[in-house]
Amino acid sequence: MKFTTVLTALATTALTQADLVERSGTKLTQAEAESRLRAGGVGWTSSGGCSDKTKPTCTSFDGVYSGTVAGAVTLKGACGCTLTITGGTETGHASGTYSHANGYKFDFSKNSQLNSYVTNTFTRIADRSDGYPQWQAASGNVYCDEGNHWDVTFY
């Protein structure tokens, strides 16, 4: 019985990981991501006015997953609000498997429409380990309110 339970758990985990890889898509170049975001009506800004992945004041899309870009475009369409990316794959963010650097996250400027959409549409879940509140979409994507922006993980 225990052996079957372990096998079932392993199969479920493998399927979940495969599903995540499928949903993540492919890595994009800066130009490819910009083109898709622009076509989807998603804007972006950079405090440094640049897109260099090695500079923390830039907003880079180099190496972002196509699923992350598609998630941003879907969010824009669903909320019908202004959506502006302020952080992408550039250095300076926390590390981890599902991190900015690995192409799974965007930071978005907060605004009243986006704030209302996230907090009224998604499910409030436990605070992140650093105390910031989080909401989870049915898709599994996690929206974390980091005070001055939304940190969104697209799974």
Image (tube, rainbow, N blue to C red):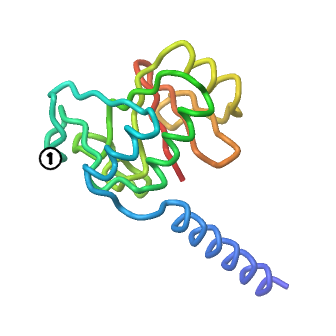
Q: Quadrant of residue 34?
A: top left
User: In which quadrant will I find the N terminus?
Assistant: bottom right
Q: Is residue 143 left or right of residue 66?
A: right
Q: Is residue 95 left or right of residue 23?
A: left
- Please tell me whether residue 151 is drawn above or below residue 155 in the rendered image: above
Picture residue at 69% right of the left edge, 32% below the top: 122
Q: Which residue is mark 1?
A: 54
Which residue in the rendered view is the most extreme toward the top? 112
The total number of labels drawn is 1
Residue 93 x %, y %: 30, 41
Residue 92 x %, y %: 23, 40
| SS at badge 1 | loop
Residue 144 x %, y %: 52, 32
Picture residue at 42% right of the left edge, 40% below the top: 39
Q: Is residue 60 left or right of residue 20?
A: left
Instruction: Identify residue type, mark 1.
Output: Thr
Which residue in the rendered view is the most extreme toward the front? 39
Which residue in the rendered view is the most extreme toward the right? 1
Residue 101 x %, y %: 31, 51
Q: Nearer the viewer, residue 122 or 82?
A: 82
Picture residue at 18% right of the left edge, 32% below the top: 57
Q: Is residue 60 left or right of residue 96?
A: left
